[in-house]
Amino acid sequence: MRKMTEQNLRAAFAGESQAHMKYLAFADKAEKEGKPNVARLFKAISFAEQVHATNHFKTLGDLGDTSANLQAAIDGETFEVEEMYPAYDAVAKLQNEKGAQQSIHGAVEAEKIHAKMYKKAKDAVSGGKDVPLGDVFICDVCGYTVEGEAPDTCPVCKVKKDRFKKF
């Protein structure tokens, strides 16, 4: 693939991915405001944006087998923990942006766990197996992630157990 086309597809993938997530956030807000049809519209178009992003991702050749995808996930989570978020946090602290600091802290703590979970899955897949996985609980405030049982209180943001979503 020629460089300019690749750069354009990577930019399109980023834009479509952001639109997908933004529209899901808009849908949640519309539901909370009692507008279920607007929420449904946002969710439907969010799915279309996901299709576009996935098509670009596949065309770029970035979708590998499960082992390669797990390694890419490990690499991404590790980059976020070791490089990206520490730099972002330093700027947020310098500028005294408390909300950004809190958001970044929650993300870093979750990303550390995600990297470990992906590593466990990659080890299982490398051995020719699926990963043994219990219930996964995600805090809907900060993203803290735990396998097994949700804690009574989130160790990162201190919300109660009922704020965890089960997967």
Image (spheres, rainbow, N blue to C red):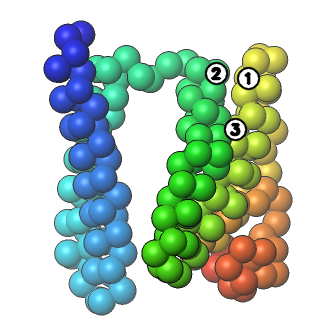
- Choose top left, top right, bottom left or bottom right for residue 35: bottom left
Residue located 81% across and 81% down the image: 152
> In the drawing, does residue 115 fall left or right of residue 34?
right
Q: Position of residue 110 (x, y in %)?
A: 66, 58
Residue 4: tell me if it is visible. Answer: yes
- Three-letter amino acid code of the residue under disc 2: Ser
Marking on residue 125: 1
Image quarter hosting the C terminus: bottom right
Considering only order in the chain, which callout, 3 or 1, is on the residue closer to the N terminus?
Answer: 3
Tag 2 near tag 1, CB within 8 Å: yes
Marking on residue 67: 2
Residue 162: tell me if it is visible. Answer: no
Farthest residue, direction bottom: 33
Residue located 36% across and 75% down the image: 28
Local SS, label 1: helix
Q: Position of residue 73 (x, y in %)?
A: 58, 35
- Three-letter amino acid code of the residue under disc 3: Tyr
Local SS, label 3: helix
Cα gap from disc 2 to disc 1, whole angstroms: 6 Å
